[in-house]
Amino acid sequence: MATRRDKLLFAVFGVTVLGLLLPLFILGWYLWQGSVVAEEQRLDELAQKLGQQTEQAILDARDLLDELNALDVPPCSPQHLNQLQEAAISRPHIRAVGYWRAVERECGAGFVQGDALTPPQASRIYDSGLVAWWPGPTTAIGGVELFLMRYGQHDVAIDPRLLVNPGLLEDQEVGLWVESMPMITHPSDAEVPDPTSFEPGLTVDRAEQRLVSRSSLDTILPIDIIAVQPMAQFWQRYLPTLAGVGAFGLLLVGLWLFLILRYFRHQLSLAQELRQAIAHDQLQVVFQPIVHLETGACQGAEALARWRRDNRETIGPDVFVPLAEDTEQGTDLTLAILRCVLRELGPQLRERPDCPVNLNITGQDLASTRFSEALQRELERAKVPARAIKLEITERSLLNTDDVRRRIQDLRARGHRIAIDDFGTGYSSLAYLESFELDTLKIDKTFADAIGHEAVTSNIISHIIVMARSLKLNIVAEGIESRHQVEWLRQQGVGFGQGYRFSRPLSAHAFRDWCQQAGDSK
Amino acid sequence: MNAIIRHNMLAAIIATLLLTGCNIMPTQGERAPDEAANANGEPARDARDTAHRDDSHAAPRNAVYLARDDDAVSARRQHLLDEGHESVALDRVGFYMDVLTARLRQELAGHDVEMEREGRIITLIFPGAKAFETNSAEIHPDMVATLDALGQVLEEYDASLVTIAGHTDSAGARGYNQHLSEQRALSVGRHLHDNGVGEARIIAIGYGPDRPIADNDTSHGRALNRRVELRVEPLTAT
């Protein structure tokens, strides 16, 4: 029985933990996804802005070259130089503008001079006649790799670092590719991975502990932007949210577990306390009289256990009886109640064994010979005859085994009479009951309640009564509260009754008085 | 680079289609008499006459050098360098040809000429039927503007050698074809010279039917073979 209880405990525990961890896990996953999506959007926006900036700068440079080629001024005249100067000044990213004849730079504005303006191989020669040299070692001046464009007689040299607005970038490393050729990295010495090795969107690169975002732009020029962010930064950004919600979730789980543990500890300590109460005979017993319906004479009583804990809290049998059974002290409890009955009502039972006390016994009591032997011992010690103790077994604990049947037979043979308690709430058939040796049938309170109210149930009680009579069993109706019920039952031929109509459960002393007042049984 | 060239060719083809539009059929029709004339050999005199007339009309144009073979072209190139002609420094060659390529693309966009770039060499191909009158070395009026634009660019980029090669198909008499190819090359050379390209940089050569680029058994192939190829290379000490 302990293992069953343990299993139950573990199961409840497991289900609870799982039931809490699962939503927590889903919540965590959802948050993580949310964070990743948010990050993806953030990086994508950033990349789109960068791409557009770059594209704008390129288009602007192209338009500028167009304008300069269309100028109708003598080459390298003051007006021409003025125009070149103005073009360079108004665009911070343009380092130089030049006018060329074939491969000779005739004149220009800006600070750039030297071989960097005549790199040996163009990156792109467009059909329009536009030539582009992407930033690289051959376009480097003073460590800055320039982006060069030439169209017709004019060229521009662009400092790609100034195409990127560092304000947008925060601490990310960003690389920008135009037509699959590297254009800019930020910071300039950053080793940004090639866009071809990543899918568009956000990739969590666990090996390198970084988030890599790839965005593409293809309005005029195909542009790829790769933004790299160390995981640490990502965590820094989203950890407060993740941690906050995670902690809250854990707190809930913790609280829930705490409550469960407390409940189980309470149950366990209750079981322990019950053990103490049984061992020290601290249980009380009250007696509810059973009367003859014709005469109203006392016909006996049912012993009902009460348990008052130290802190004055009274616990009902509906709690402690199952608890005792679950913790394998069912028989101990029954015997404790028996001892209590014998202690308080022993003399009367010796004198009047024909006014018996009903003792509730459980399935556990019938499962072994221990109860039967202990019962015999206790009765001998108290010198109470067996017929003064009637045994009540609930319909549901009446197991259909030969052992149980034999034990009931033995108990009966010793003089005990046997009553079936709470009859009608189980599913016992007539044939089933017939297989046991029984004396009394106690009809459950629910049937008495239904008398005069619910036709169907009333019909059932009639059947039960007929059946009990055919088995020659005495009938006790439980839970009688009104005169009307008494009348009806008497008419049906029910012999005995129990309930508040006659008396509430009484202490031993009060019971003795009540019996005398009500008149003796015949 | 290949992709760019292919791209450029495609652009040229599209440009051709746009320019000629529905004239594709008449253009093909124009080729037929050219072919037929070659076949019976008779109009050869006309062509020669035309060429002669060109020579007589503009005496100074004779200055364009006609190379007998490829060796003569190499010798001429070396001669120019030895004489101290304008040349490109070795480390500027790439830049020079890139910028020149771009300029040619810019200036020749929309013109009926095919352009290829391979390493340092730029090749322009003028289809015979469009560039010349039938069976004549006379430059077709439609091609004049193209050659003028080309001449302007080449004049600016004066450190380059321009080799003009005339080609014919295999139909007709060999001698006639050889002569026609030479005269057509010379015609182009003279036109460029008229546009300011230094005569020293221009070499004409006629290959006749010897260097076909397409199958001479089909009329389409023969049309492709009738052409003038203009090769631009940097003058540089190699």
Image (cartoon, rainbow, N blue to C red):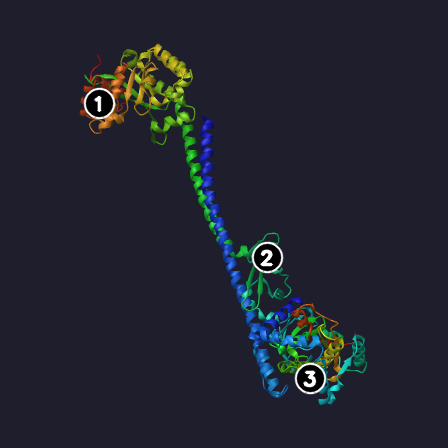
Q: Depth check: give the residue in front, A98 or B119.
A: B119
Q: Is residue A61 visible?
A: no
Q: Depth check: give the residue in front, A242 or A95.
A: A95
Residue A345, above or below B106: above
Residue visible at 64% across and 68% down in the picture: B6
Q: Are marks 2 and 1 in contact (CB under 8 Å)?
A: no
Q: Which residue is mark 3?
A: B191
Task: Say which element carries label 3.
Answer: helix
Inspect the image, locate mark 2, and give the three-letter code of the amino acid beneath it. Phe
- Foreground label between 3 and 2: 3
Inspect the image, locate mark 3, and give the three-letter code of the amino acid beneath it. His
Q: Are marks 3 and 2 in contact (CB under 8 Å)?
A: no
Query: What is the CA distance from the residue labelled 2 to the residue labelled 1?
Result: 89 Å
Give left or right: position of B57 versus A296: right
Q: Which residue is mark 1?
A: A502
Inspect the image, locate mark 1, and give the three-letter code of the amino acid beneath it. Phe
Q: Which residue is mark 2?
A: A198
**Chain ID at mark 2:** A
**Chain ID at mark 3:** B
Residue B157 point in image, percent of width and height:
70, 80
For label 2, the crowd category at 10 Å Cα-Cα, with few meaning under 14, some 14 to 19 and many 20 or more, is some
